Image (cartoon, rainbow, N blue to C red):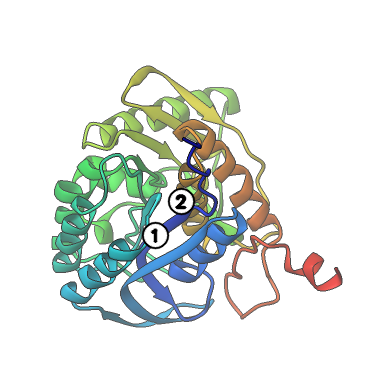
């Protein structure tokens, strides 16, 4: 008997909100999947009216329609990995938890705990935040919070009342820097210890792996912590790109990570690939698009136009 042919096209499913400006959300996710050579499918949780300047309006998709979208995909298409982004409301969050239970056993799920847009608009209701912690995080293979999101999740505080990072000041392009320091080395060590403590606290909420992303940290370093081997977290280095554009960088990072898991990478290798590709997307970001934070560019559109 001849061996079965090796399967070719891999498929990822994104469950997230739509960004009419094309920079983040479903639009960023599908671009990231394609950049990795993975076919993208989608279930839209919310329709946002937004651009590079801000979010003007949000319309939540009914929970039953979100669940129907996922089930329609799963009924016909083998999904190799799932990325969960903006959930918005508690009913949608609970519907997504039900949808994740419909996945074949072992399907990796990457959760990007979207709470607040880059413009400051709140994207997750308080009751949805509780449902996220109780129903989605325990079903996550990999959770990818940034530093403020990790503090909210670990501390149980409401996202809208979370304090700004102590000693951190935001700069354009999603870049942050420490304020006054007497010793850069001491501050880096203290900040690293705090980041690890946060990652461990979030890991205790149920995901298998936490990747604490470095965009809001003093150094652009991601921290990888695996519940299967929590003794020694892995740091994933990367350069900052203060002259780039970062709208959609978090969505891109988590979607690349999901796509690489769909292709068979280990979580650590997928996290390394996500850090590298998301960093390049920020460096190549489209600062000439819109009047606010420009969108990331995973394809290198300037190069594509000249090919």
Residue 194 vertical position relative to residue 41 in the rendered view, above or below: above
Q: Answer above or below: position of 118 versus 54.
A: above
Q: Nearer the viewer, mark 1 or mark 2?
A: 1
Left or right, 85 with respect to 266, comes to left
Residue at the spot 81% in from the left edge and 65% down from the top edge: 303
Residue at 64% x, 57% y is 282
Q: Outermost residue, front direction?
A: 1
| Front one among 252 and 115 | 252
Residue 171 place in picture, x, y as percent: 58, 57
Q: Is residue 247 left or right of residue 142?
A: right
- Decide which of 172, 250 is in the foreground and name it: 250
The Cα–Cα distance between marks 1 and 2, rounded to whole angstroms, is 12 Å
Q: Which residue is mark 2?
A: 254
Q: Which mark is residue 149?
A: none
Quick one: SS at disc 1?
strand
Q: Residue at (58%, 61%) from the top-left corner?
A: 34
Left or right of 246? Residue 80 is: left
Q: Residue furthest right?
A: 306
Q: Is residue 97 above or below residue 225?
A: below
Residue 171 visible here = no
- The residue nearer to you, when weighing 116 against 273, is 273
Of the image marks 1 and 2, the number of the one nearer the N terminus: 1
Q: Quadrant of residue 49?
A: bottom left
Specify the quadrant that holds the C terminus. bottom right
Numbered mark located on residue 13 in the image: 1
User: Residue 271 appears at what percent x and percent y?
Assistant: 51, 38
Please tell me whether residue 27 is drawn above or below residue 189 in the rendered image.
Answer: below
Compare residues 100 and 23 and report the one nearer the observer: 100
Element marked by disc 2: helix
**Whole-percent x and y of residue 68?**
22, 72
Mark 2: give few (<14), some (14-19) or many (20+) Cα within 10 Å.
many
Does residue 175 appear anywhere in the picture? yes
């Amino acid at each position: 008997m001849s061996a079965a042919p090796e399967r070719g096209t891999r498929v990822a499913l994104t469950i997230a909100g739509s960004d009419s400006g094309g920079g983040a959300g479903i639009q960023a996710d599908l671009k990231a999947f394609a950049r990795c050579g993975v076919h993208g499918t989608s279930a839209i949780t919310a329709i946002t009216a937004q651009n590079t300047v801000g979010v003007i309006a949000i319309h939540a998709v009914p929970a039953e329609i979100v669940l129907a979208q996922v089930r329609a995909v799963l009924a016909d298409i083998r999904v190799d990995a799932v990325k969960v982004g903006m959930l918005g409301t508690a009913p949608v969050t609970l519907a997504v938890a039900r949808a994740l239970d419909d996945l074949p056993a072992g399907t990796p799920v990457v959760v990007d705990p979207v709470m607040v847009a880059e413009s400051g608009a709140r994207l997750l209701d308080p009751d949805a935040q509780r449902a996220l912690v109780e129903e989605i995080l325990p079903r996550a293979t990999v959770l990818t919070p940034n530093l403020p999101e990790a503090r909210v999740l670990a501390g149980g505080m409401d996202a809208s009342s979370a304090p700004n990072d102590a000693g951190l000041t935001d700069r354009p392009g999603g870049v942050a820097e420490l304020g006054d320091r007497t010793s850069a080395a001491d501050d880096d060590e203290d900040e690293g210890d705090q980041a690890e403590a946060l990652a461990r606290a979030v890991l205790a909420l149920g995901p298998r792996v936490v990747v604490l992303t470095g965009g809001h940290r003093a150094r652009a370093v991601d921290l990888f912590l695996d519940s299967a081997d929590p003794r020694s977290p892995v740091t994933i280095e990367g350069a900052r790109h203060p002259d780039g554009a970062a709208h959609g960088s978090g969505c891109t990072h988590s979607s690349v990570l999901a796509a690489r898991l769909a292709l068979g990478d280990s979580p650590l290798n997928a996290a390394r690939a996500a850090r590298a590709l998301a960093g390049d997307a920020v460096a190549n970001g489209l600062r000439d698009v819109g009047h606010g934070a420009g969108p990331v560019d995973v394809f290198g559109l300037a190069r594509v136009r000249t090919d």
